[in-house]
Amino acid sequence: MSTEERIIRPRRRNPAFPLGDVLEYRDLLGILALRDVKLRYRQTAVGVAWVVIQPLLGAGIFTFVFGGVANLSTGDDNVPYFLFSFVGLMLWNVFGQILQKSTESLVGNQALVSKIFFPRIILPLSTVYGVLLDFAVSVVLLAVLMAVSHVAPGIALLAAPVALLLVVLSALGVGLIMAALNVSYRDVRYVVPVAIQFLLWMTPVAYGIGSLPEAAQAWVAVNPLVGALELFRWAVIGTPVTSWLAVAWTAVFAVTMFLVGSVYFQRAERRFADVI
């Protein structure tokens, strides 16, 4: 009696980023993203208004401390400090929220990871949708603030999506690594929020890099988020870019980190179901 032997091998994936798998499971990606949006503000008294309240409060505090007490300059006398800090917070919140949510995406969906087959990278990617939705709401508020402040954007506004993309890629790249590590080391979920708070003060979100001493500007420019913030502010409210070299460094870092994070995540993925 002859027996037929079949060998089942996993499908080969792109070592850099499994775009084919993501497209194949795009329906699941949309479902998870929509679920995240629905659950975020459920059973809250203020609800989705937190999307507006949080950056307004943050910008107000930064304006009082840095613009009022420290009397720092925005680099452009026509730009109010409140608007300056609000624009910085918009982009920073995209980075911080994607990083934190993607870090917890695997552990927060243990049942899915351990029982159902799908590309696990879908989970951290699904966190981006809700964050960008919050960003879109902030854009509407930004338009109102700019109209009140009599600040009009120019043709440079076309560069704003580029700055946003660089921040998303940077946050996802780091987030993919942190999500994979969080499966084995649950301390990561506690370390990341603290690291985000420290990084906030090390990044010129509430202050302009031009207001720092020249010796400190070179060190601060090493921060890969500086270039994206400078580019975004220049595109939206016209404040000058201190160093275009920092912008180039941000672009290199964002693409490299995203590819490195994707490769690391895919290599670690095979053990997720057993460890989680």
Image: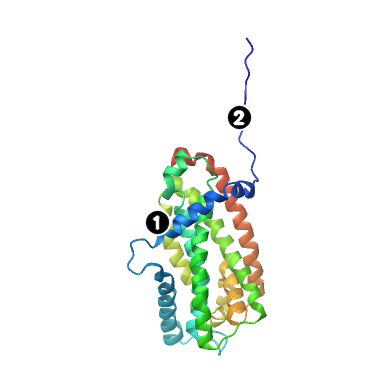
Looking at the picture, which amino acid does disc 2 mark? Ile
Q: Nearer the viewer, mark 1 or mark 2?
A: 2
**Residue count near mark 1 (Cα–Cα under 10 Å), binned few <14, some 14–19, many ≥20:** few
Q: Mark 1 or 2 closer to N-term?
A: 2
Is disc 1 placed on a helix, strand or loop? Answer: helix
**Residue count near mark 2 (Cα–Cα under 10 Å), binned few <14, some 14–19, many ≥20:** few
**Residue 152 lies in what quarter of the image?**
bottom right
Is disc 2 placed on a helix, strand or loop? Answer: loop
Q: Residue at x 49, y 51 (%)?
A: 179
* Residue at image mark 2: 8
Q: What is the distance, in whole Å, between disc 1 and disc 2 at their CAs?
A: 40 Å
Q: Position of residue 96 (x, y in %)?
A: 48, 64
**Residue 219 lies in what quarter of the image?**
bottom right
* Residue at image mark 1: 190
Q: Position of residue 61 (x, y in %)?
A: 40, 79
Instruction: Judge whether 37 appears above or below 56 on screen.
Output: above
Q: Residue at x 45, y 57 (%)?
A: 36
Residue furthest to the top in view is 1
